[in-house]
Amino acid sequence: MPESTAKKPSRIQRRNRRVILDAALEVFSKHGYRGATLDQIAAEAGLSKPNILYYFNGKEDIHVTLLSQLMETWLDPLVELDPEGDPRREILDYVERKLTMSRELPRESRLFANEILQGAPRIEPELHSHLKPLFDEKCAVIAGWVAAGKLPPLDPQHLIFSIWATTQHYADFEAQAQILLGPEADPRPRAQAHLQAMFGALLDLPEPLANR
Amino acid sequence: MPESTAKKPSRIQRRNRRVILDAALEVFSKHGYRGATLDQIAAEAGLSKPNILYYFNGKEDIHVTLLSQLMETWLDPLVELDPEGDPRREILDYVERKLTMSRELPRESRLFANEILQGAPRIEPELHSHLKPLFDEKCAVIAGWVAAGKLPPLDPQHLIFSIWATTQHYADFEAQAQILLGPEADPRPRAQAHLQAMFGALLDLPEPLANR
DNA sequence: TCGTGGATTTACCAAATGGTAAAAAAACAA
DNA sequence: TTGTTTTTTTACCATTTGGTAAATCCACGA
């Protein structure tokens, strides 16, 4: 059997683990951890339940593996925020990347939202080890921009929270948006315009002419 | 037994139904619908499981009742948005009310978030009958303000989405915020300052002097 | 081609869970 | 007090669910 200390995962193992994780993403993101069952995941993956447990040590193992693997992808847009770039451009581009991600990876967004909502019981270590340092680093970058007078005074931590909240909203609360806007096309083009205007307004330096 | 067609619920009935709903709010908001069990709710309420099923027709009945009762409270801050008031003041006050609500009713916020995340399977009718009309009405109010030149051109629907997302974020993603900001005091005072600055900037009319 | 180890299935199991029937207890009206 | 109705408990039950043991199948290298 595939042990955690095994050297070389076979071709079949790589394929099936990938298939299982993809099925698990589908099911977990739709029903939450407790709401998802191994049978559902098995059916979605086209494998038998015992076969799934041949590749993973249990339901929680699948869930944790999923979250860990996704963490990297999830943080990627923030990693790209460049301290050397133009502050306003960097932040507005970050907003756009996050919104794009909420369109292209809505399942991942909902998976994280579910986990955080429950108090992050299974992903907390990852948040401390990966998210926290990155968050602190980028907050410092933004604070530096503010200190250098390249941005108006603002709260880096809550700015980032607002970016997360507004962009992920379109994936996490998609059901609500669909009811309120109609099931037509993707609301994100207009969302993009709105968010650029909103964060753009916040990031605009007030004319130094009329000080106060 | 208490039938849906019963005339007068007794004192005991009113008390116990309230106790059960409060316990259910605690448990459902913490674990989601599937993650919550009748035993947990019973324990939290200090009643036996069959006794709970004496007052409600089942788990789903409790959940639906909870969501329906909460809907009113939930929409209240938006109802208060006054078409006759000063546009900028009205919207910024609405932001403040929503943020206050996320501090005082975090369980309710998480309950709704959970339900919407799952695709709103049980509350969808309520969303259509209550939320949608109110949303449309208030969007029209804001659109009217824009048309009257009292606000800069902006997207009412997505403005409201942004307000919901940013304010509810502090309840729904509390676990994350606590890891990133430290478990100290409530982050909402600084959140309040940030959100007022952000939405304030968006709502500010650009000086009509330099038109484009 | 044959043996060996990895991959899969079959047949289960114990615990948890939503729910019920009926007896017992408590509350209340006369 | 007594009879009646409401409330609560006790004892269950069927299903679901995460998980396991062991037999079987199958890929693949010697």
Image (tube, coloured by chain):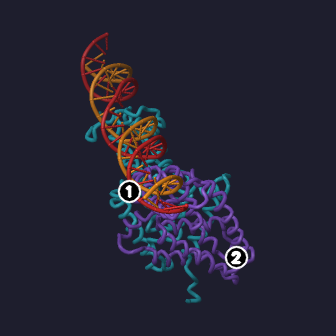
Chain colours: A cyan, B purple, C red, D orange
Secondary structure found at label 2: loop
Observer-side mark, 2 or 1, equals 1
- What is the chain letter for disc 2? B
Circle 2 residue: B83
Task: Return the residue at label 1.
Answer: B43
- In this rendered view, identify the residue nearer to me: A18 or B75: B75
Identify which amino acid the numbered label 1 is placed on. Ala
Look at the numbered disc 1 and give the secondary structure of its residue: helix
Give me the residue at 69% from left, 72% from top: B142
Give residue B37's position: percent from left, percent from top: 42, 51
How far across and down, in percent of the image, does residue B209 sit? 70, 84
Residue A175 in percent (x, y) is at 59, 54
Give the quadrant of residue D24.
Answer: top left
Q: Where is residue C14? Give x, y as percent.
A: 30, 38
Which chain is home to disc 1?
Answer: B
Locate residue C9 relative to residue B146 in the image: left or right.
left
Q: Quadrant of residue A209?
A: bottom right
Amino acid at dot 2? Pro
Q: Which callout, 2 or 1, points at the residue further toward the start of the chain?
A: 1
Q: Is residue A153 above or below residue A72?
A: below
Towards the viewer: B116 or B150: B116
